[in-house]
């Protein structure tokens, strides 16, 4: 009986060898030749059937045509222009608005550092919870016009910016093979993105984690394994960023800017069933990639973090387009934290990096983390672990609101909890003026990550009514609403509230 051999995390076999093994004991040469042909054909059929079973039928395919991204044959934001309050018009058709949501598959296999990522409401770290909450939030992001999600197989600094990284967050083992648990979590994210019509900008390597790969051959092996995994799973909604900021302290020379084009070419040349991936890489904030990278890339990645003056964003875009090796291809900023870090920028229709990028026909990506003084502010930051993946803070809301205006998207209702002076009583407040037409399936009250009850309109609750006693220690309270957008489920949550009835005697 045929049994496929495992190669990395996928299966492969040699058709000629397998067919030959089956008929090796047949002595009649003519009968052996006929039998070999029949068995070879049968094994070939089974191979393709098995191969197709590995990849589900996919719903979303991204392609690049000149400077535009297309999804399922049509340009993104088809026919749309951003019309400012002053009546100015800027085309957005073909752009890929995105956010740096890099920790979707995060885990830490170093037992000495793993404890620092514990959730505040359970005092435990849980990588599966992290991925599930990421997946739950995706439809809400998409409803605001977000089409691109930037994730990375080695994550990013879980404090925003880092020096030494003692934790081990990598989808690769030292020889470049894939960790199955990481790839299972990635699969959940990519499946949901495929359902929602979203594109994943998938990074392979991150400085500070690349050193966990034992040598250059392991890096090459990792690129091969990750690329083949994506293609054999049948994903058509993934574009690749080889590594985050090749000009920042990579240990392996092949991941540095002078040579990373070798990996870009390697990944581009891997095909499966006639399909291959679009590939690029990035440099640090304010830097323009050199000709060897631009010439090898299918799209150009830029970073705006550290760029305090939006005019520099305009210059970077112009410098790329004026390069001799540049041929029309998309320009994408997929990391920029300046609108919320620089007081002079903000989230208006002018004077910040986001709008400067869009007005010059380049896609833009939001980067957010908890600053040192915000370490205990769980609602802040998308890169700081543990992550609240919901639109849970004012600056997250500022970005998504501006994104919704630019893309003419409906957004999602805001959810808050109003707490009564009496312990255990309150009301879940759902923004209805703009969203009166949505059909809510359920409203849940959650304390310390456990659903305590569902709440019926008008969404008042009292813990005493169902005999729930607040825990003796801290309690973290949030509300979750679930509603349908067509056939798609949308989940929106309130921010987390820490000890809202503290002390237990009430206010």
Image (cartoon, grey):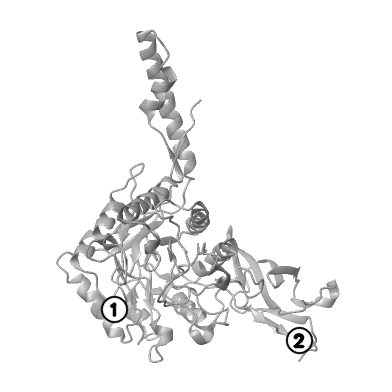
- Quarter holding the C terminus? bottom right
Q: Nearer the viewer, mark 2 or mark 1?
A: 1
- Residue 218, compared with residue 493, is above or below; it is above
Depth check: give the residue in front, 384 or 336. Answer: 384
Picture quadrant of residue 237: bottom left
Q: Which mark is residue 420?
A: 2
Instruction: Say whether disc 2 or disc 1 marks the residue closer to the N-terminus.
Output: 1
Q: How many marks?
A: 2
Query: Of helix, strand and loop, which one carries label 1?
Result: loop
Q: Residue at x 43, y 34 (%)?
A: 48
Pointer 2 with pointer 1, Cβ within 8 A:
no
Q: Residue at x 47, y 44 (%)?
A: 55
Residue corresponding to mark 1: 286
Observer-nearest residue: 247 or 315? 247
| Residue 54 as seen in the image, left or right of residue 351 | right
Q: Residues within 10 Å of mark 2 (few under 14, many from 20)?
A: some
Distance between mark 2 and mark 1 Cα atoms: 49 Å
Regarding residue 315, the answer to whether it shows in the image is yes
Q: Residue 94: tell me if it is visible.
A: no
Name the outermost residue toward the left: 324
Q: Residue at x 28, y 49 (%)?
A: 269
Q: Position of residue 301 (x, y in %)?
A: 31, 68
């Amino acid at each position: 009986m045929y049994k496929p051999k495992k190669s990395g995390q996928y299966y492969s076999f040699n058709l000629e060898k397998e067919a030959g093994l089956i008929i090796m004991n047949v002595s009649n040469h003519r009968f052996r030749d006929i039998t070999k042909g029949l068995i070879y054909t049968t094994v070939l059929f089974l191979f393709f059937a098995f191969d197709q079973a590995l990849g589900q039928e996919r719903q979303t395919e991204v392609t690049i045509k000149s400077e535009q991204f297309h999804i399922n044959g049509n340009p993104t934001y088809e026919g749309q222009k951003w019309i400012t309050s002053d009546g100015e018009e800027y085309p957005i058709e073909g752009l890929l608005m995105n956010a740096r949501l890099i920790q979707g598959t995060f885990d830490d296999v170093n037992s000495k550092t793993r404890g620092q990522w514990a959730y505040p409401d359970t005092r435990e770290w849980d990588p599966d919870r992290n991925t599930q909450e990421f997946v739950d939030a995706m439809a809400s992001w998409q409803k605001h016009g977000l089409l691109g999600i930037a994730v990375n197989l080695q994550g990013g600094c879980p404090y925003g910016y880092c020096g030494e990284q003692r934790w081990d967050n990598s989808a690769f083992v030292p020889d470049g093979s894939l960790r199955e648990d990481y790839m299972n979590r990635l699969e959940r994210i990519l499946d949901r993105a495929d359902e929602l019509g979203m594109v994943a900008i998938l990074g392979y390597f991150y400085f500070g984690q690349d050193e966990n790969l034992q040598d250059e051959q392991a890096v090459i092996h990792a690129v091969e394994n990750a690329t083949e995994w994506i293609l054999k799973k049948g994903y058509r909604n993934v574009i690749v960023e080889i590594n985050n900021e090749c000009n920042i302290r990579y240990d392996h020379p092949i991941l540095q800017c002078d040579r990373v084009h070798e990996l870009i070419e390697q990944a581009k040349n891997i095909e499966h069933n006639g399909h291959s991936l679009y590939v690029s890489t990035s440099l640090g904030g304010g830097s323009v990639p050199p000709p060897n990278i631009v010439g090898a890339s299918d799209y150009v990645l830029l970073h705006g973090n550290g760029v305090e003056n939006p005019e520099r964003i305009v210059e970077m875009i112009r410098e790329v387009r004026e390069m001799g090796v540049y041929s029309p291809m998309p320009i994408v900023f997929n990391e920029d934290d300046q609108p919320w870090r620089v007081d002079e920028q903000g989230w208006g229709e002018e004077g910040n990096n986001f709008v400067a990028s869009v007005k010059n026909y380049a896609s833009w990506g939001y980067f957010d983390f908890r600053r040192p003084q915000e370490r205990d502010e769980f609602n802040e930051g998308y890169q700081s672990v543990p992550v609240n993946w919901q639109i849970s803070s004012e600056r997250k809301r500022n970005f998504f609101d501006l994104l919704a205006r630019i893309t003419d998207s409906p957004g999602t209702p805001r959810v808050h909890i109003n707490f009564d002076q009496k312990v255990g009583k309150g009301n879940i407040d759902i923004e209805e003026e703009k969203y009166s037409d949505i059909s809510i399936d359920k409203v849940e009250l959650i304390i310390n990550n456990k659903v305590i009850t569902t709440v019926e309109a008008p969404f008042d609750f009292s813990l005493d009514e169902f005999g729930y006693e607040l825990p003796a220690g801290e309690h973290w309270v949030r509300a979750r609403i679930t509603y349908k957008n067509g056939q798609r489920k949308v989940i929106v949550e309130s921010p987390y509230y820490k000890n809202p009835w503290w002390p237990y005697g009430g206010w």
